[in-house]
Amino acid sequence: MKTYFKYFLGIIIALGLLFPMLQSKFTFFEEEKLEGVTTVTEKPIFSKENYFNLSWQENYNAFLNDNFGFRTQFVKGYNQVLYDVFNTAKAPGVVVGKDGELFIESYINEYIGRNFIGKSKIVENVLKIKQLQDSLKSRGKDLIVIFAPGKASYYPELIPDNYLSMKKDSTNYKIYASEFANKQVNFLDLNKWFYQNKANFKHKVYPKYGTHWNHYGMAVALDTILKYIQKKRSISLTDWNYNVVSYNTALKGNDFDVGVLMNLTYPIEADPNPYPAYKFKNEEDSYKPNVLVVGDSYWWCLVSDQLPKHFFNEDEFWFYNKTQLIKNEKRADVKNLNLSASLAQRDVILLVATEATFYIFPYGFVDNAYKLYCQNNSKRFNELLANINNDKIWLEEINKKALQHKISLNQQVKAEAEYILSEELFSSKESVENIIERIKGDDIWMKEIKKKAVEKNISIEQQIKEDAQWMFNKN
């Protein structure tokens, strides 16, 4: 009897080892993909070179690890054991908090001060923001900083004790909030406001298994933002109502964005979340300002629900200052946009961040805008104005634009000069100054320059500048 049992056990073990090999070779069963896994290692191509430098062996080992049969079932089973027995998540960056609350670790890292970038860097950023705010205000535009609530700051009592034991006094949030107050920056601190009003909310504002605010939470936040803009601009925005709320376990948007990353054999049961029924009403005196939002994924939640378009004339969002989205559709890479033209017609610029991204805030936007609006570019700006005013054909084209935009010629000339300056500051194209140097170092080119200068009765230096500007605009 014992001998039969040994044979039976041996067969079971052999089949357990053989089935994954057969599945990876013949794919008898279609396997589900793991959530959050965007890339799988491809089979490496064999060659003598990569064999003898051992890269083929390393890559093939990675290929086998990502592609063995029933991998999804094994991974989910392993994750299930860790979650059930040790209350731990295997998903990268996911932390299981008290009462089973799921967090993304970057939020906790900010709350405990682990990713503190230092006071001097924050002070530098705030000074630039303040100067940019004042410069834009002189142009009739309002720059507003909004710190969205963070789940770690909202539920500190649910953070695991091993993280809380590492909490430091200095955090990016604390220093930013203090410096914004000292420098009188337009700052809406929803992180603080949400925590202070936790007991007053009619419904929960965070899903248990998500890292972003839920639909009710973002409606409360947007309402607060709109009231702030109304007061700042002395305008009346579209009226709306979100008081009718229903709970549902058929979660939408980001309400289960952490839970889905757990990749468990038996998925976590969704917690009911509140969903407002939005109602909008345009009054006679309602006004839609032209607003640009630069921020992180918290604003994307609002865009996904198509809320901003009801209140703003332009629903434009620069995600991390990298991707331009208009009405939730990708249009361009921000680096390819002209900053001056992008901001020219804006009434309000919102800088939005939550605690997970305070360490990279304000995403490079302020540095670029500061370079354009706050640094001393007067010499180059005046040169551009002179070039425009001395070119009759160019001036005629600008006059047509002025009539279209219903502004004075002088205003349109300045806008044109600012546009070109922005191109020179941020474009990957060769700068006008470099082109001038190339012209001066090219004997054949200089002969043509001198000939044209004589024909037009202008100085050689002026002709060099005109040729350089023409080359720059052409490219």
Image: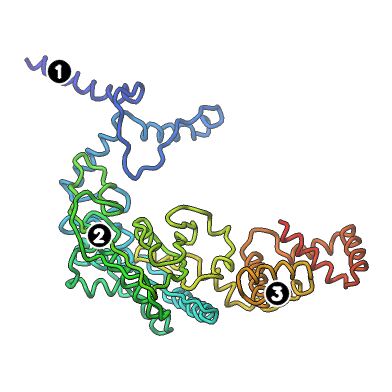
- Mark 2 belongs to which amino acid? Ala
Q: Give the image quarter of residue 307.
A: bottom left
**2 or 1: mark nearer the eye:** 2
Which quarter of the rendered picture does the C terminus lie within?
A: bottom right
Residues at marks 3 and 1 touching, judged by CB atoms closer than 8 Å: no
Q: Can you identify the residue that label 3 sits on?
A: 380
Q: CA distance from mark 2 to mark 3?
A: 53 Å
Residue 23 x %, y %: 31, 24
Which residue is depicted at the point 80% across and 66% down? Answer: 466
Quarter of the image with the N terminus in it: top left
The label on residue 167 is none
Q: Position of residue 53 (x, y in %)?
A: 52, 34
Which residue in the structure is indicated by mark 2? 277
Q: Amino acid at mark 3?
A: Arg
Report helix, strand or loop for mark 2: loop
Q: Is residue 112 visible?
A: no
Label 3's element?
helix
Residue topped by disc 1: 8
